[in-house]
Amino acid sequence: MAAPPRPESLALLDRLMEALKAKGIVSDAEIAERQANTDKASPETGARMVARAWTDPAYRALLLSDGTAAAEAMGVSMAGAPPLGVLENTRTRHHLVVCTLCSCYPRAVLGYPPSWYKSFAYRSRAVREPRAVLAEWGLSLPDSVEVRVVDSTADYRWMVLPMRPVGTEGWDAARLAAIVTRDALLGVAVPKVG
Amino acid sequence: MPDDQHTPATHDIGGLPRFHCTPVEHDEAPPDAFGKKVDALRQVLAQKKLMTVDELRRGIESIPEGEYFALGYYERWLRSIAGLMVEKGLVAKDVLE
Amino acid sequence: MSDAPRFAPGATVRVKDDWPERRGPCHIRTPHYIRGRRGTIVRPLGVFANPEDLAFARPAPKRNLYHVLFEQEPIWDEGKPGDTVMVEVFEHWLEEA
């Protein structure tokens, strides 16, 4: 588990907030509003984008060529957000997203990054021993599949378009979205039926 | 592989042997109240053009190695933000001590 | 400086074997493990203000950014041949190979 903040960190935040408020630089209301906005983003958005791409070839093409526009087409405001890129998993290629330098993450469509994504172990190991990390998640890929690690080092944020699993023929987008987990959108898992 | 002469910077941890045997803890918990507040503060300061995400990272990367690995994620952010506000003269250093 | 990308998809490039972190304070987005390595341009990603300048609140000229693909195994001397790592790299870190 992530350790709780130390008392000195809580005190530093209080002092910094008081100093910034005293100078009129920020207000509690602004912080609360920003937090409420941030809390709204969730992996359900990414899942809805994937489900639509599985059922709508034109949207799929848009998603892969311009993730930012594809997010906006789902009603997500991308103003001020880094550009979104989407990488397609195939029968012969599986993408795994990591940020070895910090914790770059497609927050606009997935929300806050989970603790493990920010952990030293994940940041360090995913890029060097991706198959071992995937095995810890219970995902074992055949040797015929290229594991392509995506180190998110600069201005883009990356999301994975997983393969639609067999057994979902005839499903509508809502039912499909329900099997697209946050982990599948990062490549540590694949969508499963049932 | 980098040799001894080419030791990567503290934050540049891709492939580092020291974490080779550390399992990835599947901790799904969202940020706590402290983390969310620091996160929101960074966004508000960025919106007001008082700092960039690149400056935030530079500040995090300048945290000494021992503390970098000991502090929590949002504790590192807070350390960087506080340092930047002092550096820019927006907050007096002694106010934070 | 022109915004047109210097490298085309499929071009073989080499990442500069440069270690600015040894020369003093800096902020760079080129991870240690690809320095000096050969890779292949996957595609240009557009132009972005140079984070190395943004991090110090300096005027930041725009630079071309690329997705560059590397083979995993030669980097770490381990792993499965055919597995790869794709990294965003700025043009000023790349040279013809």
Image (tube, rainbow, N blue to C red):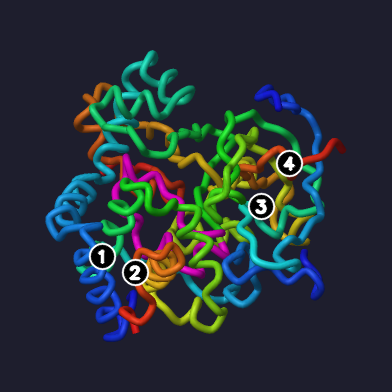
- Pointer 2 local density, CA inside 10 Å: few below 14, some 14–19, many at least 20: some
User: Could you say where residue B97 lies in the image, as x and y percent from the top left?
Assistant: 34, 84
Which residue has dot 4 on it?
A: C92
Distance from label 3 to label 1 (Cα)? 34 Å
Residue A115 falls within the magenta-colored stretch: yes
Q: Amino acid at mark 2?
A: Val
Q: Nearer the viewer, residue A73 or C53?
A: C53
Residue at image location 24% in from the left, 62% down from the top: B36
User: Could you say where residue A155 lies in the image, as x and y percent from the top left?
Assistant: 51, 41
The tag on residue C12 is: none
Where disc 4 sits, the SS reads: helix
Residue at image location 31% in from the left, 30% down from the top: A49
* Foreground: disc 4 or disc 1: 1
Residue at image location 62% in from the left, 37% down from the top: C61
**Chain name for mark 3:** C
Where disc 3 sits, the SS reads: loop
Which residue has dot 3 on it?
A: C30
Task: Determine whether label 2 and label 1 are within 8 Å by CB.
Answer: yes
* Part of the protein shown in magenta: A101-125
Residue C23 falls within the magenta-colored stretch: no
Which residue has dot 1 on it?
A: A20
Where disc 1 sits, the SS reads: helix
Which residue has dot 2 on it?
A: B91
Where disc 2 sits, the SS reads: loop
